[in-house]
Image: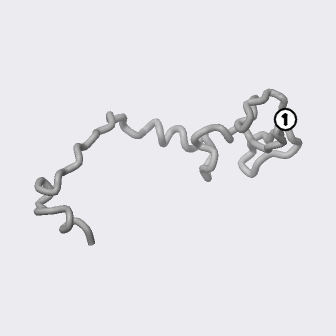
Amino acid sequence: MRCPECRSTAVKERPECTAQGYRRFRCLDCTKQFNERSAGLLNRTQYPSDVIAPVIASIPFSPTIRLKPLSPAEAGLSSYKEAMP
């Protein structure tokens, strides 16, 4: 386990767990406290990973669509001033 802040491997497991049951750690170099999910995308989610994973897996994959921004004329405006409130 590495510290997400300083990337040190000098970490110590804390005796208590998070509310969702994840192990907690303290970095001995920078003294930051973190848990098993601290460096992940799901860190601040309300639900455990085993509940979220099937939901994410069920979302169909689609490539990112990049849209070209419209010019004022293409947007139906005669000038930039019309776009400003």
Q: Position of residue 7 (x, y in %)?
A: 73, 31
Which of the two residues, 66 or 12, is positioned nearer the viewer here?
66
Quarter of the image for the C terminus: give it. bottom left
Crowd rating for badge 1 (residues with CA inside 10 Å; few <14, some 14–19, many 20+): few
Count every numbered label the image shows and give the total: 1
Left or right: 6 with respect to 46? Answer: right
Query: Which residue occupies 47% across, 40% down?
Result: 56
Left or right: 38 with respect to 17? Answer: left
Q: Above or below — where is 69 with respect to 2? A: below
Where residue 36 sits, quadrant-wise, is: top right
Where residue 83 sits, quadrant-wise, is: bottom left
Q: Position of residue 55 (x, y in %)?
A: 48, 42
**Amino acid, disc 1:** Asp
Q: Above or below — where is 46 with respect to 25? A: below
Q: Secondary structure at mark 1?
A: loop
Q: Position of residue 12 (x, y in %)?
A: 86, 34
Q: How is the image coloured?
A: one colour
Left or right: 64 with respect to 69? Answer: right
Query: Which residue occupies 57% across, 41% down?
Result: 41
Query: Which residue occupies 51% across, 38% down?
Result: 54
Which of the two residues, 78 or 26, is positioned nearer the viewer here?
78
Q: Above or below — where is 64 with respect to 74? A: above
Quarter of the image for the N terminus: give it. top right
Left or right: 68 with respect to 40? Answer: left
Q: Position of residue 46 (x, y in %)?
A: 61, 53
The residue under label 1 is 29
Query: Which residue occupies 65% across, 38% down?
Result: 39
